[in-house]
Amino acid sequence: MIEPYDDAYFMKRAMQEAEAAYEKGEIPIGAVIVVKNQIIARAHNLTETLNDVTAHAEMQAITAAANYLGGKYLKDCTLYVTIEPCQMCGGALYWSQISKIIYGARDEQRGCIAMDTKLHPKTVLKGGILADEASTLLKRFFIEKRNLN
Amino acid sequence: MIEPYDDAYFMKRAMQEAEAAYEKGEIPIGAVIVVKNQIIARAHNLTETLNDVTAHAEMQAITAAANYLGGKYLKDCTLYVTIEPCQMCGGALYWSQISKIIYGARDEQRGCIAMDTKLHPKTVLKGGILADEASTLLKRFFIEKRNLN
């Protein structure tokens, strides 16, 4: 049986958000939140546009998903995010009690694994979905930014 | 010389925010952000009102302070918060590069010390200012909540 709604399908939607961030000169990270194969929130990093360090893709997606659901817990939800979440986003995901976090590429320096951020005991963390695409876009962004300065 | 603007002075302002949260049935935690003895942001926990796990006092104060300053880094700022920040707020403060974090009471379970959250190397963390007042209000809230259910 062909399963159109697999992890790659939803990660591609998160990558589209990352590309939207890239087009705005934002660090290109995107996220979607999914319940029963339905996307209920999509967001991309807006820290520059909003002048706000808290405006990571995941944070906005958590707020939007809770708004959609009418409740603050995301127990049956899956977050797809192109780059491994940081401490802040991992901490927010802890409070949300989200069911699954699926990321693309690792953030070896500031990701929640390196930082030893505690996730909710019920949360499953899985990485490596479209990792090359996610890290290539991020590298391209930083190379271009360096060349501009 | 009498110094009217000491840590207790600003922590009292943060306590007023915590009391405002308490009056709304929110977990009573309040915060202010200060630059050169001037309060540039004040906020209290609104997770219930906004249905949003990210609506901690510190998160809102960081966003408001950056908005006031017109830039996302809080390098010369001090955060006063009635209870030790959690992982999420500690992670946000890491990104903000805030100069000082002064908290009232420890959160032995979910505070950034117990959770081993990494702060920015330039950030000074200090606790114990009006700790009894902050923890008494929090305990009162949870006792009353338990008795209502």
Image (cartoon, coloured by chain):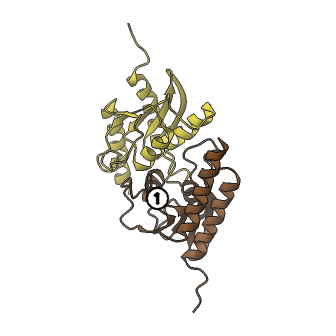
Chain colours: A brown, B yellow
Q: Looking at the rendering, in which quadrant would you find the N terminus of chain A?
A: bottom right
Which residue appears at 42% of the width and 22% of the height? Answer: B9
Residue B125, percent from left and from top? 36, 34
Label 1 secondary element? helix
* Residue B27 visible at all: no
> Mark 1 — on which chain does it sit?
A
Residue density around tag 1, few if under 14, some if 14–19, many if 20 or more, within 10 Å: many
Residue A25, percent from left and from top? 67, 50
Instruction: Return the residue at label 1.
Output: A93
Q: Looking at the rendering, in which quadrant would you find the C terminus of chain A?
A: top right
- Residue farthest top in this picture: B1
Q: Nearer the viewer, residue A143 or B37?
A: A143
Which residue appears at 63% of the width and 50% of the height? Answer: A46
Q: Nearer the viewer, residue B144 or A141?
A: A141
Q: Is residue A145 left or right of residue B30?
A: right
Q: Is residue A74 above or below residue B49?
A: below
Residue B55, percent from left and from top? 51, 48
Q: Nearer the viewer, residue A10 or A147?
A: A147
Q: Is residue B54 above or below residue B105?
A: below
Q: Splitting the image into 4 quarters, where does residue A113 fall?
A: bottom left
